[in-house]
Amino acid sequence: MKSPDKKPWVMITGGTRGIGKGLVEAFCAAQYEVVFTYQSSTASAEALEKSLQEKGYIAKAYCCDGADQAAMQALAKALIDERGAPYALVNNMGITRDTVLMRMSGEQWSEVINTNLNSVFYATRSFIDSMLSEGDGVVLQMSSVSGFKGNIGQSNYAASKAAMIGMTRALALELGRFNIRVNAIAPGYIATEMVSEIPEKKLKTIVDTIPLRRMGTVEEVASLATFLACPKNAYITGQTFVIDGGLTA
């Protein structure tokens, strides 16, 4: 068991914007110590860290390219040495490089797979041994409805997100006997910076296809994440929770 001087902490990859930022804020509000990573958004990371600390929360940002296995291993070792095993690992980092397959370069394919999928393996592999030693913990994968429902121009993104769902199921079977729970969240269209880049006319057409006739909020996604991490919900594992306003109904 954890020593009494080490508080439960959560590791979130890609935590400076959009859903990632919402996750960091929600887990802090749920009284966890939070460590989050960023790759290049130094100003945003520092601003978020300062804002949360001013509210009395414990949050710390680290610059780390999650698609670099050696970098993630080094960060994980340093954090485990300092804090012990994380209670939860939230694999959130992700990018898009949208274009139809006929025009997609090998670089566009590899960049998305490396960032969205390989990073999940690198982070999980780097932290999981310490979590196994505790005999308790949560792994959350931030997937997407694109893993279920195809989008034109997103073969690379959809492939990465569908693979995260398959990985979630396999890991749940592997880790259940160690009391490690593994679940995935598949958001639909959420009001983030990424979605705001969609042209207004196209976005309206998209919203009209959603039964609830609106986009989701970052807060709604983050609330689901903290629900799944809560020890009171410890009989849930191996599942993918779609939060899309009925888009895939």
Image (spheres, rainbow, N blue to C red):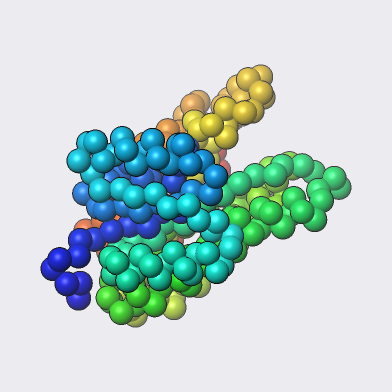
The image shows residue 96 at horizontal and vertical percentages of 65, 44
Q: Would residue 230 appear left or right of 165 to someone viewing this image?
A: left
Q: On screen, 222 above or below 117?
A: above
Q: Quadrant of the N terminus?
A: bottom left
Q: Residue at the location (57% across, 35% down)?
A: 194
Give the residue at the far top of this rendering. Answer: 201
Q: Would residue 195 appear left or right of 153 to someone viewing this image?
A: left
The image shows residue 172 at horizontal and vertical percentages of 43, 71
The image shows residue 66 at horizontal and vertical percentages of 54, 58
Q: Residue at the location (30% across, 48% down)?
A: 59
Q: Would residue 73 appear left or right of 79 to someone viewing this image?
A: right
Give the residue at the far left of this rendering. Answer: 4
Q: Residue at the location (48% across, 69% down)?
A: 73
Q: Residue 86's image quarter?
A: bottom left
Q: Nearer the viewer, residue 244 or 154?
A: 154
Q: Residue at the location (66% across, 53% down)?
A: 112
Q: Nearer the viewer, residue 34 or 60?
A: 60
The image shows residue 116 at horizontal and vertical percentages of 59, 55
Answer whether residue 190 is visible to the viewer in this image: yes
Q: Would residue 65 appear left or right of 96 to someone viewing this image?
A: left
Q: Residue 234's image quarter?
A: bottom left
Marks counted in the figure total 0
